[in-house]
Image (cartoon, grey):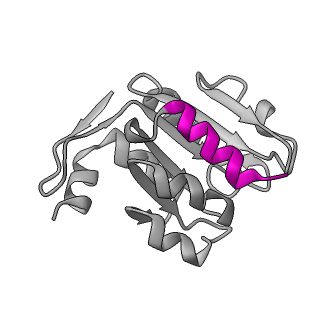
Amino acid sequence: MLNFLIPGHDNVKIENILIDFNGTLAVDGILHEGIADKLAELSKIVDITVVSADTNCTIKEQLKNVPIEVRAFDGKNVSEEKKNILRQLNPVRTAVIGNGFNDHKMMREARVAIGVMGEEGIYSSLFSFTDICVSSIHDALDLFLKPNRIIATMRK
């Protein structure tokens, strides 16, 4: 578990991180280089669930050796599926990371929402639902591996 004492906020306790796959962890279904190692390191601290409609049918292969939970589902009602998974994990104890329109419902309800502006860009309205926006998935995961970054960015 991660515990953040952020000035101006209630104590933030994160037990889970819910992450979108395509556009966030991967581009065109291929995991960004070095991300598997960061996910493995972070999984020692929190539970990680990666979710996707798996447009490219690669999620299970790309993440097969990473100690995380992978949840793929059909391409219908993706934003509802992600929100429902968040609710199963407990939104108050979960951070989410995403970049697309179908991430907005989980971002609204999560304790901490991170938007990633990667190669696919970020859905512009998502900015209003995020606590922090970063330029890469490496930066997003590093926020949790180096928690003072979250504290510095979110303090009031």
Residue drawn at x 73%, y 25% is 64
Could you say which is closer to the camera, residue 45 or residue 82? 82
Is 121 magenta? The answer is: no
Image coordinates for residue 86, horizontal then vertical, percent: 55, 40
Is 84 magenta? The answer is: yes
Residue drawn at x 81%, y 39% is 73
**Image quarter in which the C terminus is found:** bottom left
Please determine whether, in this image, residue 28 is positioned above or below residue 71: below
**Residue 37 showing in the rendered view:** no
Residue drawn at x 12%, y 54% is 7
Please determine whether, in this image, residue 137 is positioned above or below residue 64: below
Image coordinates for residue 139, horizontal then vertical, percent: 43, 55
Res 65 → quadrant: top right
Instruction: Judge left or right: residue 58 versus residue 120.
Output: right
Instruction: Judge left or right: residue 136 versus residue 44.
Output: right
Image coordinates for residue 49, horizontal then vertical, percent: 59, 33
The magenta region covers 76-89
Image coordinates for residue 146, horizontal then vertical, percent: 29, 43
Res 16 → quadrant: top left
Residue drawn at x 68%, y 58% is 23
